[in-house]
Image (tube, rainbow, N blue to C red):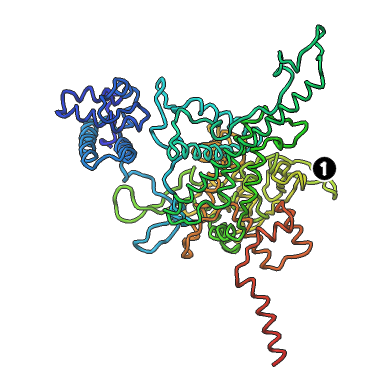
């Protein structure tokens, strides 16, 4: 405990610690250099280039850095070494001086030293062979593609300058234009899509800057997509002979004015067609360059059609932002009067997606539906574990039984409910689960009539097994085609007597049961499964332990915000990698894979006719899409009916 103590009169900042070290450490000037040159830039402070003297701003910046951040200084220093490609001698020298200063600070007991012997044990049910390391989701890749060097604008330090203490792009006009494109795209596209398209635009601009050697200050969207005025009015020709007016403000020669306006617009369209060639040539040159870059990484085919479509889509978005004042929405449909956008759309249609290649990639992230159900059962059983056996933290031989952390149990409850909703009913798109909200999209109640027209909400159930939960969707991807959607959540009873509704209610609200038969207890009388208690002593569901700051059903434990698509996908991937590795091969199953796994399993069962149509409706797509894109058939499953029939023919003729 003594080593973990913080001295009450310890310095508050790194700068104060350096001031004290002036009289105690002989090589303090070299220690200062190690910090100011090779650590401060990674903390967000000013950077001192080779041959330049360290600025006073860098020294003043250390006054704002808490002393506790000194523990991460070695890692930050290594990041900076990699970024500037420092020599071995430089790295060795500055590592030594930083380590000397850090050891001196720790001897003063000014920092809280992390002691691994006092960590809470991590819950782990995987019984791996001796010497075998557990596999995590980040360890697995489902593609062998290698990424070439990043050329996107903003990925290198030279793209930025320090302005009033802030790190900004060296071309503020271009940054403002990209922000305008982002705001324009956010009106009709998802934030993630817009963010990806801005990244693609920065990659093309980075190509122009680093490969075509266009100066950074000259970069602008007009260089990539030259804008031409396409719409004209009388005000544009004020004072010209063709638009001369009399004393009452009427045109002297209306026919000549109309001819002049029509000729001007026609010439503008011709000029726009020529300018569109500039954009197409840049995009094609960019694709050729990317192909050569990828060929050096062992990918001679270059960018895939899907990647090219994404890049072209980003340029189309920027073109719409450029020409948003030049299109006529009353006479044309979706920028059809803009030449560059028409050309880009024709180009994007030339990139045909390879459905079979896509299915093979999805197959690498899929398991048989039977195994998916097994993983759900393993996750459910893990939720019931309220105690773990781990080694004694005091260094004694043997293991002790401890109660799991409240947050850990809450996270497992959440995973169980999520996985149950994805396996016990036909799997929906992941956005459905991320946006679930009790009383709105997850409702408890019943319909008054057989026509299912009037639904009566019954609120929070007092008895989970007397409830009836429904998924109710109004806004989803194909809602315009299929309309409002209802589906009952089944109250499945598991082999140990627990029901799925108990997990839902226990996660959301908690409930009382004097018998206490759920979950399985390892020792003592504990009823934590009923939920957690808040500060006022009120019973709450396990969701409350995650401290969500929103109304959505599921919450990211650390951020306390609703799941985004990346975090939700990571949770499912990690869950499946965690349990599938016990069978010999870890598979990073994604949320979208569930829809393919279920469709393939239904085809294996021979579901057809009205049942197939019903499943397609529940999955929110047509039977044709269901068979064409979601049902995976390998060679053996395709030839099996022919093999069986051919054998029957042979037996009948011999």
Element at label 1: loop
| Side (left or right) of 373 relative to 147 | right
| Nearest to the observer: residue 459 or residue 431 | 431
Q: Is residue 427 left or right of residue 579?
A: right
Q: Position of residue 547 (x, y in %)?
A: 53, 36
Q: Position of residue 565 (x, y in %)?
A: 57, 44
Q: Residue furthest toward the bottom?
A: 654
Between 23 and 420, the residue placed more toward the observer is 23
Name the residue located 68 percent from the left edge and 41 percent from the top edge: 460
Residue drawn where x is 49% and y is 36% of the image: 205
Q: Is residue 243 above or below residue 531?
A: above
x and y percent of residue 314 in the render? 58, 40
Residue 545 seen by the camera: no
Toward the left, the furthest residue is 26
Residue holding disc 1: 454
- Quarter of the image with the C terminus is bottom right
Q: Position of residue 131 (x, y in %)?
A: 34, 61
Quarter of the image where one finds residue 271: top right
Does residue 637 sit above or below 105 in this rendering?
Answer: below
Q: Residue at x 51, y 28 (%)?
A: 174
Q: Is residue 78 left or right of residue 193?
A: left
User: Is residue 356 left or right of 93 when viewed as pictured?
Assistant: right
Q: Which residue is at 53% across, 36% downward? A: 560
């Amino acid at each position: 405990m003594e080593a973990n103590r913080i001295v009450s009169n310890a310095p508050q900042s790194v700068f104060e610690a350096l001031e004290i070290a002036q009289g105690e450490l002989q090589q303090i000037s070299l220690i200062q250099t190690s910090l100011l040159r090779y650590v401060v830039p990674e903390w967000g402070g000013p950077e001192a280039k080779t041959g330049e003297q360290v600025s006073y701003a860098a020294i003043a910046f250390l006054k704002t850095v808490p002393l506790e951040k000194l523990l991460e200084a070695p890692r930050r220093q290594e990041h900076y070494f990699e970024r500037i490609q420092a020599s071995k001698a430089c790295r060795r020298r500055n590592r030594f001086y930083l380590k000397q200063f850090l050891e001196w600070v720790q001897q003063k007991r000014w920092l809280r030293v992390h002691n691994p012997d006092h960590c809470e044990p991590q819950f782990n049910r995987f019984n791996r062979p001796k010497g075998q390391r557990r596999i995590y989701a980040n360890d697995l890749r489902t593609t062998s593609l290698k990424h070439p060097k990043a050329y996107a604008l903003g990925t290198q330090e030279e793209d930025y300058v320090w302005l009033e203490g802030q790190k900004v792009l060296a071309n503020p006009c271009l940054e403002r234009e990209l922000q305008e494109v982002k705001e324009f795209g956010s009106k009709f596209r998802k934030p993630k899509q817009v963010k990806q398209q801005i990244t693609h635009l920065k990659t093309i601009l980075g190509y122009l800057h680093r490969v075509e050697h266009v100066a950074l200050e000259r970069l602008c969207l007009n260089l990539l997509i030259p804008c031409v005025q396409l719409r004209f009015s009388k005000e544009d020709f004020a004072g010209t002979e063709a638009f001369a007016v009399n004393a009452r403000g009427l045109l002297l020669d209306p026919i000549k004015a109309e001819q002049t306006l029509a000729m001007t617009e026609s010439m503008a369209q011709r000029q726009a067609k020529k300018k569109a060639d500039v954009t197409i040539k840049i995009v094609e040159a960019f694709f050729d360059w990317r192909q050569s870059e990828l060929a050096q990484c062992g990918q001679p085919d270059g960018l895939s059609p899907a990647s090219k479509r994404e890049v072209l889509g980003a340029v189309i978005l920027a073109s719409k932002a450029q020409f948003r004042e030049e299109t006529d929405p009353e006479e044309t449909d979706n920028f059809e009067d803009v030449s560059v956008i028409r050309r880009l759309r024709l180009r994007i249609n030339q990139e045909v997606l390879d459905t079979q290649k896509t299915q093979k990639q999805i197959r690498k992230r899929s398991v048989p539906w039977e195994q998916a159900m097994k993983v759900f059962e393993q996750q459910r059983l893990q939720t019931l574990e309220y105690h773990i056996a781990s080694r004694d933290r005091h260094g004694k031989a043997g293991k002790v039984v401890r109660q799991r952390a409240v947050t850990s149990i809450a996270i497992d409850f959440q995973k169980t409910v999520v996985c149950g909703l994805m396996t016990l009913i036909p799997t929906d798109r992941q956005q459905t689960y991320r946006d679930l909200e009790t009383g709105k999209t997850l409702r408890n109640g019943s319909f008054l009539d057989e026509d299912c027209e009037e639904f009566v909400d019954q609120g929070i159930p007092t008895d989970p097994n007397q409830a009836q939960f429904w998924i109710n969707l109004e806004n989803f991807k194909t809602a315009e085609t299929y309309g409002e959607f209802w589906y009952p959540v089944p109250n499945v009873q598991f082999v140990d007597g627990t029901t799925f509704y108990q997990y839902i209610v226990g996660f959301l609200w908690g409930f009382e049961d004097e018998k206490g038969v759920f979950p399985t207890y390892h020792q003592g009388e504990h009823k934590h499964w009923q939920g957690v208690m808040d500060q006022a002593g009120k019973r709450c569901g396990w969701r409350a332990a995650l401290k969500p700051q929103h109304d959505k059903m599921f919450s990211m434990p650390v951020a306390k915000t609703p799941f985004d698509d990346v975090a939700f996908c990571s949770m499912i991937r990690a869950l499946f990698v965690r349990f599938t590795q016990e069978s010999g091969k870890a598979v990073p199953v994604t949320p979208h894979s569930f829809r393919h796994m279920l469709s393939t399993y239904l085809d294996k069962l021979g579901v057809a006719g009205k049942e197939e149509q019903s499943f397609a409706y529940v999955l929110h797509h047509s039977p044709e899409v269901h068979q064409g894109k979601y049902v995976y058939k390998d060679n053996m499953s395709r030839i099996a009916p022919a093999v069986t029939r051919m054998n029957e023919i042979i037996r009948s003729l011999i």
